[in-house]
Amino acid sequence: SGYFEAADPVLRGMGASFTVMLWFFPEFDPASPWEAEQKLLHLMHSTPSADHTSVYINGTRLLTYVNGKAETEAAVEVVPNMWHHLAMVTEVDSGGVLRVFYDGEQVLDQPEMLRFDPFPSSLRVGELFEGRVDEVKVLARTLTLEQVMPLMKNREHPENPNELLAYYRFNKDFYSDFGEYEGFSSGVVRIVASDAPWEPTIVYSINGNAIDPANPYANMAKSKYAGGETLEVVGFNFAPSPLLMCAWGGEPASQMGVKLHPAPPKNMSCPVKASSLSRWDGLTPAMEAYPQLMPDATYTTAPDSVSSGTTLTCMTPATASAEFTHFTMGTGPTHNHLPFEFTEQSLHCDGVAGYVAADNLTLGMDASAGYTVSMWVFPMETPPEGESVPMEGGREAGVAPARRVLVSEKRFRRRRLAGHAGAAHSHVPTTVLAFEGADGSNKALVMYDGERFLYYDDLILDATTFTAEGSRADEWHLVTVRVHDGEGDLYVDGKPKEHFTTRSFPEAGNRFSLCQDYFSDAGAVVTGSFFRGMLDNVRVYLDGTMAVEAASHTTMSWPDGFWAMFEFKASVSPEPAGRGEANAEGVELVATTAPWSPPHVL
């Protein structure tokens, strides 16, 4: 039975062209909505006195009554139990037009509307409406949608106060917050505590990591750049609304009213110069003043759920690359913005039974004239908890026969060719990448023995090692193999490691796998030699003369000779799509740092 009614001086000031806007929170069960005219805005005409124009909810639909009938074609479904924004605009200069904006979109443009002459005789809000209403603003002029949007989230007065006739906030009484025009209530109407999408939000924690206002970088939030990860965000005033967003970047933050100020200038000298951070691959670090508050891009996602206005969950969006940005949460202004990293993600192999097989990659492949394989490899030295490290000859108890094949005479011969037979370690060589025949014959393998990377195939003739320097575990290394006219080279981190001669090369129909290779055991082809670590940016070219830099990450486009690439953004399958789907066992895509992307110094 309750409603709120604007004061008479407000009506007289409105004239025939005006804008009325408000926020409303309908409270009904969508399974059994109330089939009645719940009038959000109800305006009576002076002449004829019995006519009216209104915007109302009937059941679950938002409808408009104008010119003596209901405009059902403009009906929209209303989601209950969340805040929505509504604006009614009348314009007489173009013959009488009524426009209705709902949640930032125009839902009605009614020409030849019955004019309010000379002004509405009454303005009621919430008549027969069950729910909450707030932020009622009455302006003595016609606004466009672009002009309504900033006022929707702005709880301050407009720059030109003469345009604002009344502003009812219902914080303590029914007086207008501007103009001191008292409104009137009738029936069961009361002021209640409520969250509010136009009021500031603040984030306390993300996934249980509390935010320290004095040092927000201490618990920087991180996510894989492929997106799809769930964040549990705890904070204040997460008012449910279609406009409530989890936002990363600058544009939505500015729309929310975030003040992104750069750090104050300081007289200081930095001992680290950009030149001292130079890298062999030519990537230049990005040097930014602390704190860096203007992200490069903008991403928003709607929350999956909101609980009591203080807790919500949302899914992280996908980004094009590893990126440093800032996270905000809300509909209106926000009190804080948090550092956020979208990290690279890579393939992680468990070293026990994990591998990726992509045999279709070799269909139609002709590498007889030469080929190049380039990849980033992160070997892991520490075994998983409770797992023993396989020893040569199977001396470690519990090593399966499939692992002992690694120390066959063929593998020992390969170690001697590499120039470091008898090295003082007990690690078994494991296979990082393998091209193999259907019978398990070795066409081209890249291996890691705990100290260094090796190349191997069944037809290798000789191998010369250029340096005894190894490649440490728990670090990223760029590994490149080039073979052309029977001559091959292995490069690690841009440096030549081995030169070899061979009559072997990958052929169409060969098997292809990552983190393991096949071998024959009692007439059957089985898997083994499992590599433990991470892989990324695995690229295959049908060109054995490429420069090492051209085959690595510094080339963003696909040059001539490109055949296939594994980026591990959202799947383990290679690109382009014509190279077929990959099968995976015991692997996962994990968040990681990315040496193929520029570093970011804050």
Image (cartoon, rainbow, N blue to C red):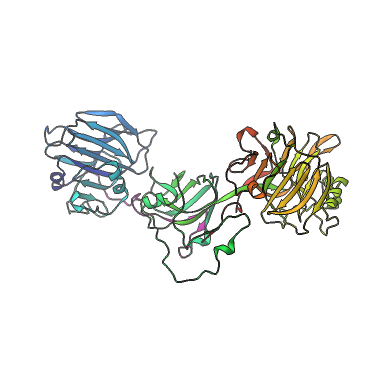
Residue under the point 64% across and 45% down:
588
Instruction: Look at the image and give the residue range highlighted in magenta.
Output: 187-214
Residue 132: tell me if it is visible. Answer: no
Q: Is residue 72 magenta?
A: no
* Main secondary structure along the magenta-highlighted residues: loop
- The quarter of the picture where residue 517 lies is top right
Residue 597: tell me if it is visible. Answer: yes
Q: Residue furthest right?
A: 409
Q: Is residue 115 left or right of residue 224?
A: left
Q: Is residue 210 magenta?
A: yes
Residue toward you, 77 or 450: 450
Q: Quadrant of the N terminus?
A: top left
Q: Is residue 388 left or right of residue 321?
A: right
- The quarter of the picture where residue 146 lies is top left
Residue under the point 22% across and 54% down:
177
How many numbered marks does the figure carry? 0
Q: Position of residue 212 (x, y in %)?
A: 48, 62
Q: Position of residue 273 (x, y in %)?
A: 55, 65
Q: Position of residue 534 (x, y in %)?
A: 67, 49
Q: Position of residue 95 (x, y in %)?
A: 17, 33
Residue toward you, 8 or 447: 447
Residue toward you, 213 or 520: 520
